[in-house]
Amino acid sequence: MRELNSVEVNAVSGAGYITDIGAALGESIGKIVEVATGKTGSSSIGQQMGQSIGAIVENAISTISSIFGNLFGRK
């Protein structure tokens, strides 16, 4: 078994730009909810939700890219 390089580790862990953007957007929305309602905790929940949605989008893009790469012989 070989050791993964940093790019592969990021791909496996779900780390990426879309995940980061989703987390930041979710946290921002959560902060707005906190200000509007006066309750705390919404920003961390929003961050987690945004990160999860971003990871789903990244995985979908990766899967579609892989499928087209395999169909057209690109690796």
Image (cartoon, grey):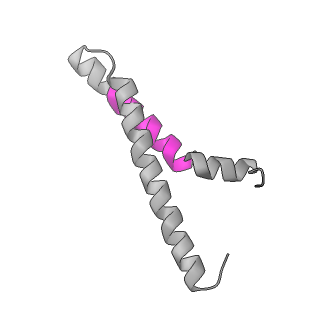
Q: Where are the magenta residues, as a range? A: 17-30
Q: Is residue 8 left or right of residue 36?
A: right
* Residue closest to the far front: 1
What is the quadrant of the N terminus in the image? bottom right
User: Residue 26, image x and y in percent?
Assistant: 38, 36
Q: Is residue 35 left or right of residue 52?
A: left
* Residue closest to the far left: 37
* Count of marks placed on residues: 0
What is the quadrant of the C terminus in the image? bottom right
Q: Is residue 9 shown above or below 69?
A: above
Residue drawn at the location 78% of the way across and 54% of the way down: 2
Taking depth in this image into account, of 1 and 10 the one nearest to the observer is: 1
Q: Is residue 71 shown above or below 48?
A: below
Q: Of helix, strand and loop, which mostly describes the magenta segment? A: helix
User: Residue 49, image x and y in percent?
Assistant: 37, 38
Residue drawn at the location 21% of the way across and 18% of the way down: 37
Taking depth in this image into account, of 33 and 68 the one nearest to the observer is: 68
Quarter of the figure with residue 32 = top left
Taking depth in this image into account, of 23 and 8 the one nearest to the observer is: 8
User: Residue 66, image x and y in percent?
Assistant: 56, 71
Q: Is residue 63 left or right of residue 43?
A: right
* Residue closest to the far bottom: 72
Residue drawn at the location 44% of the way across and 40% of the way down: 51
User: Residue 11, image x and y in percent?
Assistant: 61, 52
Magenta span includes 23: yes
Residue drawn at the location 29% of the way across and 20% of the way down: 34
